[in-house]
Image (tube, rainbow, N blue to C red):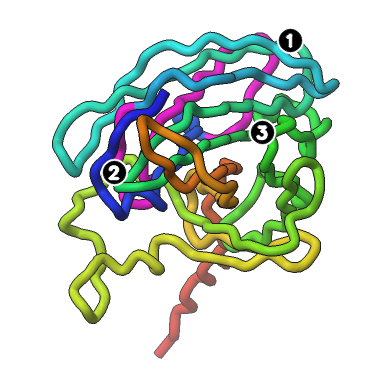
Amino acid sequence: MCFFIWSPYLASANKLILYTDNDSYGSTNQEKIWYIAFGDPALAKFLDLKVPTQFFLLDPTGKKNKIVLMREELFDPWFNQKRIAYKTKLMVREQGDYLLCIEGDEFLVGRGKIIKPLAKAVFHVEQELNWDGLCGFELEIKVFTRPYGLPVGALFWGQVLYQGEPLNQGEVEVERLRLKLNPQTLLKDSTGAVNLPLYKKTTKLDQRGYFLVNFEEEGWWVITVRLPRGVKTFGNQNYPFELQSHLWLYVYPFESKKKPKSPRKKISN
Protein backbone atom coordinates (compact mmCIF):
# COMPACT_ATOMS: atom_id res chain seq x y z
CA MET A 1 0.00 0.00 0.00
CA CYS A 2 1.16 3.54 -0.75
CA PHE A 3 -0.08 7.03 -0.12
CA PHE A 4 0.70 10.35 -1.78
CA ILE A 5 2.75 13.22 -0.40
CA TRP A 6 2.79 16.18 -2.78
CA SER A 7 6.15 17.74 -1.98
CA PRO A 8 9.30 17.20 -4.05
CA TYR A 9 11.54 18.06 -1.10
CA LEU A 10 10.00 15.37 1.11
CA ALA A 11 10.97 12.69 -1.39
CA SER A 12 14.48 12.66 0.09
CA ALA A 13 13.67 13.89 3.60
CA ASN A 14 11.09 11.41 4.94
CA LYS A 15 12.31 8.81 7.39
CA LEU A 16 10.95 6.28 9.86
CA ILE A 17 11.37 7.95 13.25
CA LEU A 18 12.17 5.82 16.32
CA TYR A 19 12.79 7.30 19.78
CA THR A 20 11.85 7.39 23.48
CA ASP A 21 11.21 10.29 25.85
CA ASN A 22 14.74 10.02 27.25
CA ASP A 23 17.68 7.74 26.42
CA SER A 24 17.73 4.17 25.10
CA TYR A 25 18.35 2.56 28.51
CA GLY A 26 15.97 0.32 30.40
CA SER A 27 15.75 -2.02 33.39
CA THR A 28 14.48 -5.57 33.67
CA ASN A 29 10.78 -5.89 34.49
CA GLN A 30 10.28 -2.18 33.98
CA GLU A 31 8.17 -0.73 31.14
CA LYS A 32 9.78 1.45 28.49
CA ILE A 33 7.74 3.29 25.84
CA TRP A 34 9.11 3.78 22.32
CA TYR A 35 7.52 5.97 19.64
CA ILE A 36 7.37 5.36 15.89
CA ALA A 37 6.55 8.15 13.44
CA PHE A 38 7.22 9.33 9.88
CA GLY A 39 8.54 12.57 8.44
CA ASP A 40 11.55 14.88 8.36
CA PRO A 41 13.35 14.60 11.74
CA ALA A 42 15.65 17.63 11.43
CA LEU A 43 12.86 20.03 10.48
CA ALA A 44 10.05 18.57 12.65
CA LYS A 45 7.93 18.13 9.52
CA PHE A 46 5.73 15.12 10.30
CA LEU A 47 3.23 13.10 8.27
CA ASP A 48 0.70 10.34 8.97
CA LEU A 49 2.25 6.89 9.34
CA LYS A 50 0.49 3.71 8.24
CA VAL A 51 0.97 0.56 10.31
CA PRO A 52 4.46 -0.83 9.53
CA THR A 53 4.76 -4.08 7.57
CA GLN A 54 6.88 -5.79 10.24
CA PHE A 55 7.86 -4.86 13.79
CA PHE A 56 9.66 -7.03 16.32
CA LEU A 57 12.21 -7.05 19.15
CA LEU A 58 15.37 -9.17 18.90
CA ASP A 59 16.65 -10.34 22.28
CA PRO A 60 20.40 -10.66 23.04
CA THR A 61 20.37 -14.27 21.75
CA GLY A 62 18.87 -13.22 18.41
CA LYS A 63 15.38 -14.55 19.10
CA LYS A 64 12.45 -12.58 17.64
CA ASN A 65 9.80 -11.34 20.06
CA LYS A 66 6.42 -9.94 19.06
CA ILE A 67 5.55 -6.40 20.06
CA VAL A 68 2.24 -4.55 19.99
CA LEU A 69 1.78 -1.15 18.36
CA MET A 70 -0.76 1.34 19.69
CA ARG A 71 -1.93 4.45 17.88
CA GLU A 72 -0.39 7.72 19.04
CA GLU A 73 -0.37 11.34 17.85
CA LEU A 74 2.54 13.63 17.01
CA PHE A 75 2.11 17.38 16.54
CA ASP A 76 3.20 18.83 13.19
CA PRO A 77 4.19 22.52 13.64
CA TRP A 78 4.27 23.17 9.87
CA PHE A 79 0.53 22.61 9.39
CA ASN A 80 -0.48 23.05 13.04
CA GLN A 81 -2.14 19.65 13.28
CA LYS A 82 -1.72 16.21 14.81
CA ARG A 83 -0.30 13.33 12.78
CA ILE A 84 -0.81 9.58 13.15
CA ALA A 85 2.08 7.82 14.89
CA TYR A 86 2.45 4.69 17.04
CA LYS A 87 3.99 3.59 20.31
CA THR A 88 5.03 0.28 21.81
CA LYS A 89 5.55 -0.62 25.47
CA LEU A 90 8.55 -2.87 26.02
CA MET A 91 9.27 -4.84 29.18
CA VAL A 92 11.97 -7.53 29.24
CA ARG A 93 13.10 -10.00 31.89
CA GLU A 94 16.72 -10.59 30.90
CA GLN A 95 19.68 -8.22 30.83
CA GLY A 96 21.41 -7.42 27.57
CA ASP A 97 21.04 -5.38 24.40
CA TYR A 98 17.79 -5.69 22.45
CA LEU A 99 17.19 -4.57 18.86
CA LEU A 100 13.92 -2.80 18.05
CA CYS A 101 13.36 -3.49 14.34
CA ILE A 102 10.73 -1.71 12.22
CA GLU A 103 10.00 -2.35 8.53
CA GLY A 104 7.78 0.38 7.09
CA ASP A 105 5.27 0.10 4.28
CA GLU A 106 6.19 1.35 0.81
CA PHE A 107 5.42 5.05 0.26
CA LEU A 108 4.98 7.01 -2.94
CA VAL A 109 6.56 10.35 -2.07
CA GLY A 110 7.08 13.62 -3.85
CA ARG A 111 6.08 13.40 -7.47
CA GLY A 112 7.81 10.25 -8.48
CA LYS A 113 9.64 7.96 -6.05
CA ILE A 114 8.67 4.88 -4.04
CA ILE A 115 10.63 4.34 -0.83
CA LYS A 116 10.84 1.36 1.51
CA PRO A 117 12.01 2.56 4.98
CA LEU A 118 13.68 0.34 7.58
CA ALA A 119 14.63 1.47 11.08
CA LYS A 120 16.32 0.06 14.17
CA ALA A 121 17.50 1.16 17.60
CA VAL A 122 19.34 -0.62 20.42
CA PHE A 123 17.46 -0.96 23.72
CA HIS A 124 20.14 -1.35 26.40
CA VAL A 125 19.07 -3.23 29.53
CA GLU A 126 21.68 -3.16 32.31
CA GLN A 127 24.37 -5.31 30.63
CA GLU A 128 26.43 -4.98 27.44
CA LEU A 129 25.53 -7.96 25.29
CA ASN A 130 25.04 -8.10 21.50
CA TRP A 131 24.92 -4.33 20.84
CA ASP A 132 26.39 -5.02 17.37
CA GLY A 133 23.55 -7.37 16.33
CA LEU A 134 21.56 -7.11 13.08
CA CYS A 135 17.83 -7.03 12.39
CA GLY A 136 18.37 -8.93 9.14
CA PHE A 137 17.20 -6.09 6.87
CA GLU A 138 18.12 -6.21 3.18
CA LEU A 139 19.90 -2.88 3.69
CA GLU A 140 21.32 -2.31 7.18
CA ILE A 141 23.92 -0.39 9.17
CA LYS A 142 26.28 -2.57 11.22
CA VAL A 143 27.70 -0.79 14.25
CA PHE A 144 31.35 -0.98 15.33
CA THR A 145 31.04 1.71 17.99
CA ARG A 146 28.72 0.88 20.91
CA PRO A 147 25.51 2.77 19.97
CA TYR A 148 24.69 4.06 23.45
CA GLY A 149 26.52 6.02 26.13
CA LEU A 150 27.66 8.46 23.44
CA PRO A 151 28.57 12.01 24.55
CA VAL A 152 28.42 15.09 22.35
CA GLY A 153 31.42 15.05 20.01
CA ALA A 154 31.77 11.24 20.06
CA LEU A 155 33.14 9.59 16.93
CA PHE A 156 30.90 6.80 15.61
CA TRP A 157 32.10 3.98 13.31
CA GLY A 158 29.70 1.90 11.22
CA GLN A 159 29.42 -0.14 8.04
CA VAL A 160 26.61 -0.41 5.48
CA LEU A 161 25.57 -3.91 4.38
CA TYR A 162 23.36 -4.81 1.42
CA GLN A 163 22.12 -8.41 1.43
CA GLY A 164 24.79 -9.16 4.03
CA GLU A 165 27.69 -7.78 1.97
CA PRO A 166 29.49 -4.41 2.32
CA LEU A 167 28.12 -1.66 0.07
CA ASN A 168 31.12 -0.39 -1.89
CA GLN A 169 29.74 3.04 -2.79
CA GLY A 170 27.18 5.51 -1.51
CA GLU A 171 26.81 7.88 1.42
CA VAL A 172 25.08 8.28 4.77
CA GLU A 173 23.07 11.26 6.01
CA VAL A 174 23.13 12.29 9.67
CA GLU A 175 20.61 14.53 11.42
CA ARG A 176 19.15 15.29 14.83
CA LEU A 177 15.48 14.79 15.73
CA ARG A 178 13.61 17.99 16.61
CA LEU A 179 10.12 17.39 17.98
CA LYS A 180 9.33 21.03 18.72
CA LEU A 181 10.23 23.73 16.23
CA ASN A 182 9.02 27.07 14.95
CA PRO A 183 9.60 26.81 11.18
CA GLN A 184 10.20 30.57 11.06
CA THR A 185 13.35 30.18 13.18
CA LEU A 186 15.14 27.86 10.73
CA LEU A 187 18.44 29.36 9.60
CA LYS A 188 18.66 30.54 5.99
CA ASP A 189 21.56 30.53 3.54
CA SER A 190 22.68 33.43 1.31
CA THR A 191 19.94 32.65 -1.23
CA GLY A 192 17.18 33.00 1.38
CA ALA A 193 16.35 29.27 1.42
CA VAL A 194 16.51 27.03 4.50
CA ASN A 195 20.17 26.06 5.00
CA LEU A 196 19.56 22.29 4.72
CA PRO A 197 23.26 21.26 4.75
CA LEU A 198 23.48 22.87 8.18
CA TYR A 199 20.79 20.52 9.54
CA LYS A 200 21.67 17.40 7.54
CA LYS A 201 25.30 16.36 7.08
CA THR A 202 26.55 13.81 4.56
CA THR A 203 29.48 11.37 4.69
CA LYS A 204 30.61 9.08 1.86
CA LEU A 205 31.22 5.35 2.32
CA ASP A 206 34.63 3.88 1.57
CA GLN A 207 35.06 0.86 -0.71
CA ARG A 208 34.27 -1.53 2.16
CA GLY A 209 31.12 0.31 3.24
CA TYR A 210 32.67 1.92 6.32
CA PHE A 211 31.96 5.44 7.56
CA LEU A 212 32.77 7.74 10.49
CA VAL A 213 30.44 10.44 11.86
CA ASN A 214 30.12 12.58 14.98
CA PHE A 215 27.36 14.47 16.80
CA GLU A 216 27.37 18.14 17.83
CA GLU A 217 24.29 18.26 20.07
CA GLU A 218 22.55 16.14 22.66
CA GLY A 219 19.36 14.27 21.79
CA TRP A 220 18.16 11.63 19.34
CA TRP A 221 20.09 11.27 16.07
CA VAL A 222 19.51 9.17 12.96
CA ILE A 223 22.04 7.80 10.47
CA THR A 224 20.43 7.05 7.10
CA VAL A 225 21.61 5.18 4.02
CA ARG A 226 19.68 5.10 0.72
CA LEU A 227 20.00 2.61 -2.13
CA PRO A 228 18.23 2.88 -5.53
CA ARG A 229 16.80 -0.50 -6.59
CA GLY A 230 15.34 -0.09 -10.05
CA VAL A 231 11.66 0.70 -10.60
CA LYS A 232 8.31 -0.37 -9.18
CA THR A 233 4.82 -0.07 -10.58
CA PHE A 234 2.11 1.87 -8.79
CA GLY A 235 -1.21 2.23 -10.57
CA ASN A 236 -0.33 2.29 -14.26
CA GLN A 237 3.02 4.01 -13.84
CA ASN A 238 6.59 3.00 -13.07
CA TYR A 239 8.51 4.90 -10.38
CA PRO A 240 12.12 4.78 -9.14
CA PHE A 241 12.34 2.50 -6.11
CA GLU A 242 14.64 3.20 -3.17
CA LEU A 243 15.51 1.31 0.01
CA GLN A 244 16.19 3.44 3.10
CA SER A 245 17.74 2.11 6.30
CA HIS A 246 17.91 4.16 9.51
CA LEU A 247 19.91 3.69 12.72
CA TRP A 248 18.62 5.69 15.69
CA LEU A 249 20.77 6.51 18.72
CA TYR A 250 20.85 8.88 21.68
CA VAL A 251 23.64 11.39 22.41
CA TYR A 252 24.27 12.77 25.91
CA PRO A 253 25.34 16.34 26.71
CA PHE A 254 29.02 16.71 27.51
CA GLU A 255 29.55 18.43 30.84
CA SER A 256 33.09 19.57 31.53
CA LYS A 257 34.18 19.72 35.15
CA LYS A 258 34.75 23.27 36.21
CA LYS A 259 37.54 23.98 38.64
CA PRO A 260 36.24 25.47 41.88
CA LYS A 261 37.09 29.09 42.30
CA SER A 262 39.80 29.71 44.87
CA PRO A 263 38.70 32.02 47.70
CA ARG A 264 39.90 35.58 47.44
CA LYS A 265 42.67 36.50 49.80
CA LYS A 266 42.19 39.49 51.98
CA ILE A 267 44.77 42.16 51.46
CA SER A 268 45.81 43.81 54.66
CA ASN A 269 46.72 47.45 54.66
Mark 3 closeness class: few <14, some 14–19, many ≥20 residues within 10 Å: many
Residue type pointed to by label 3: Val
Q: Which residue is mark 1?
A: 93
Question: Where's residue 146, x and y in %?
Answer: 74, 46
Q: Is residue 255 visible?
A: no
Q: CA distance from mark 3 to mark 2?
A: 25 Å
Residue occupying the far front of the picture: 236
Mark 2 closeness class: few <14, some 14–19, many ≥20 residues within 10 Å: many
Residue type pointed to by label 1: Arg
Horizontal placement of 207 versus 219: left or right? right
- Residue 36 part of the magenta segment: yes
Q: Which residue is mark 2?
A: 45
The disc placed on residue 123 is none
| Stretch of the chain drawn in magenta | 23-48
Question: Where's residue 86, x and y in %?
Answer: 41, 20
Seen at 50% across and 16% down, the residue is: 88
